[in-house]
Image: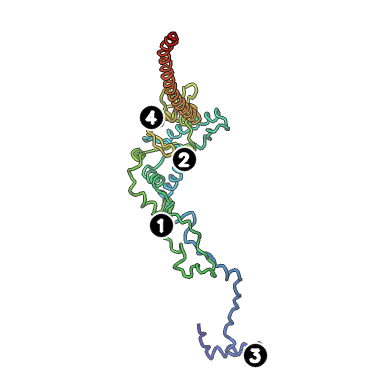
Amino acid sequence: MTRPPICARCWRLLGKKTQSHGQPLLHPQYLSTASAITPSPPLDQTIISTPPISRYHPTQPPSHRPPELRKSQLHRQYTSLLRSTPLMLLFQHNNLKATEWMAVRRELANAMQTHDTNSPEKDPQYIPSHSIKLQIIQSRIFSAALRVVEYWDPSPYSHNAPPPSSDPLDPSTQSSVSGIPNTTPSPADPAFTHALSRTAHSAVAAKKKSHPLMPLLSGPLAILTFPAVSPTHVKTALSILSPRAPKFPAPTRRANPGYHDPVTQAGLQKLLLLGARVEGTVFDTEGTRWVGGIEGGLEGLRGQLIGLLQGFGAGLTGALEGAGKSLYFTVEGRRLMLEDENGPSKGTGEEGH
């Protein structure tokens, strides 16, 4: 930028001020500003360049829908819940009031705490009661999250290649801005493989009615989640939320008077058991009660399986041994019969001699 010329009046004023202070008048060429001295960059900065700046937060990559919406956050929450919960029971609730929900949750929590008191912490099936939660879900968002969990596999789209080199001495280093990744990210980029990505949405768009749990995901729903598969806890929960004698009897009035409170009973009458999802497998109402009715929990189921395998092996061994013994007795009987037939003839020949 060129400096504007100084007028004659300014020169006269500047000369008067310098003469009054007793300082010599400077030549106009010394009135220009001096250039700043820029230090040379460090040696490390000239050898290793800084990596490209990410244009999005690492925990909030570009998504198919705006991630700040409540629907997106619920979708992310349901996806994490389905991936981390091996056992969940599905209920339909019909216009439950807030007081009824409070009463139902209170009785369920009391029953689970009683179960924890009777079960030692060293038990392999021990589950803390505070980790078992009953919550209301949005059926449409939950079904979308279920499709992503069941039918979306991001492994073919994952990039396992090492990051590009940033060393300027390396010939493979990108030398232009167009080659630097993630400078202008787009939701349509197939490199984004999270649950809210556009790639995942497009991959499961045609799977709306193929999952066996989809017919149950309609209307007002609530789920009861367990952090581990425990038939004893399922039995306790069904005895409170969906009792049925004789395997799932409701607590008596003397043992638990709060369970027979009118508010609690009104809330329980509005709950309907629909099914369960156990280790990715869908069970109907009877299958859910079968899981809860396993005697001894998982240990009892393992014992039944071992007994069944042992019984099958013993039966197979007995069948093979029976066939061998039958053949042995048949051959031995035939040999004795032949010896009896040849015995008198040999005796008659010896008498003749």
- Label 2: few (<14), some or many (≥20) within 10 Å? some
Is label 3 or label 1 in front? Answer: 1
Q: Residue furthest top?
A: 351
Residue under circle 2? 85
Instruction: Residue 239: give x, y in percent of width and height.
Output: 44, 27
Closer to the chain start, of discs 3 and 1, is 3
Residue under circle 1? 190
Residue contact at pointers 4 and 2, CB within 8 angstroms: no
In the image, 17: left or right of 326? right
Q: Nearer the viewer, residue 27 or 214?
A: 214
Residue 334 visible within the image: yes
Q: Assign a secondary structure to mark 3.
A: loop
- Label 1: few (<14), some or many (≥20) within 10 Å? some
Name the residue at 55% across, 27% down.
118
In space, the residues marked 4 and 2 are separated at their CA atoms by 21 Å
Name the residue at 46% across, 56% down.
159
Residue contact at pointers 4 and 3, CB within 8 angstroms: no
Q: Assign a secondary structure to mark 2.
A: loop
Q: Nearer the viewer, residue 78 or 327?
A: 327
In space, the residues marked 4 and 3 are separated at their CA atoms by 107 Å
Residue under circle 4? 286
Q: Amino acid at mark 2?
A: Thr
In space, the residues marked 3 and 1 are separated at their CA atoms by 73 Å
Residue 263 visible within the image: no
Residue under circle 3? 24
